[in-house]
Image (cartoon, rainbow, N blue to C red):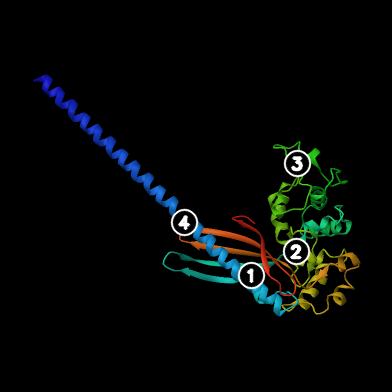
Amino acid sequence: MNTAKHKRGVALITAMLITALTGSLAAGLAWNNALDVRRTMVLLFHEQGTQVALGAESWIRNILRDDGIDSQTDHLGELWASELPGLPVDNDSVQGAVSGKIEDLQGRFNVNNLIDRNGKIDPVALEQFKRLLIVLDVNPRFAGLTADWIDADQNAGFPDGAEDSIYTSMMPPYRTFNRSLVNVTELMALEGMDKLSFDRLLPHVTALPGRTSINVNTATPAVLQSLDANMDPIAVEGLLSQREESGFQDIKAIFGTLVTDTAILDQLDGSSEFFQLKAVVQIDTVRLTYYSILLRAPNGGPVTTILRSQGTY
């Protein structure tokens, strides 16, 4: 009798263990399946968001092309300069919204202008970059560090330069780029660059292929102030009031008395070729930030995309 009771007890415990294990296994499978479904949906929403961003980019290319045909100048009163309102994305497969804005990258200082056509450091551009850093309350030594980062040689500038001998001693070690920047975020690799300084600098600098002019119709106030050592905030306010939304009517006449260096004066322009689209797409719970650099050929030529990135500038 005791043996029979013992066997029944063991059988009951075994059945309970099997039931518990089966339930745990079923719960685990259901959880993993739910995670797989969610991962799949996130990937699907991300891909849909990318396609929406590409559609926005195509639309913006048409706007810039038409603007190039209709106007020979670029200023902040034009259609392309207005912020794109939030537009719904709603069909059978996609529900969300897209918004964004276009910026004229030639309203910023092109750090690749620090190197002349012979691959040497351009002293005029270097001094302008130093003035820009001072206006932004950023250490001006970053001008020399940037020039050394992109020039072709390994000769550190004095007193603010740095080449491989400095960077290879860091942890982790790395080497200078020694060529034109592709993305302005590469400035974060400079010796001593901190996030606060970079965040202050970012809205006023860009990295465009080759040497480019500065569009004073769209230039930031800090970039305008960097054009000459004698340019002060009061002079910049006067320029901004003249510029308003329609741009300057006679750039040479207006800036000829303010900019003493003819090399900088010759780089001032009222039109642009390089623009940046920032598109923000929300699909369900997935949010995608998409950047696209666009090159517009002169005289109403085609607009092509030369660089795309997601999530970061």
Look at discs 4 and 3 and give the one toward the viewer.
4
Q: Residues within 10 Å of mark 2 (few under 14, many from 20)?
A: many
Disc 4 to disc 3, C-alpha distance: 39 Å
Residue wearing tag 1: 61
Residue wearing tag 3: 175
Q: Residue at x 52, y 71 (%)?
A: 87
Disc 2 to disc 4, C-alpha distance: 36 Å
Residue 181 lies, in percent from the top left, at 74, 53
Residue 273 lies in quadrant: bottom right
Asked whether the beta carbons under mark 1 and mark 2 sit within 8 Å of each other, the answer is no
Q: Nearer the viewer, residue 91 or 4?
A: 91
Of the image marks 2 and 3, the number of the one nearer the N terminus: 2
Disc 2 to disc 3, C-alpha distance: 27 Å
- Amino acid type indicated by mark 4: Leu
Residue 25 lies, in percent from the top left, at 31, 38
Dot 1: what SS?
helix
- Amino acid type indicated by mark 3: Arg
Image disc number at residue 73: none
Disc 1 to disc 3, C-alpha distance: 37 Å
Q: Residue at x 73, y 40 (%)?
A: 174
Q: Nearer the viewer, residue 198 or 90?
A: 90
Dot 2: what SS?
loop
- Image: 165 above or below 294: above
Of the image marks 2 and 4, the number of the one nearer the N terminus: 4
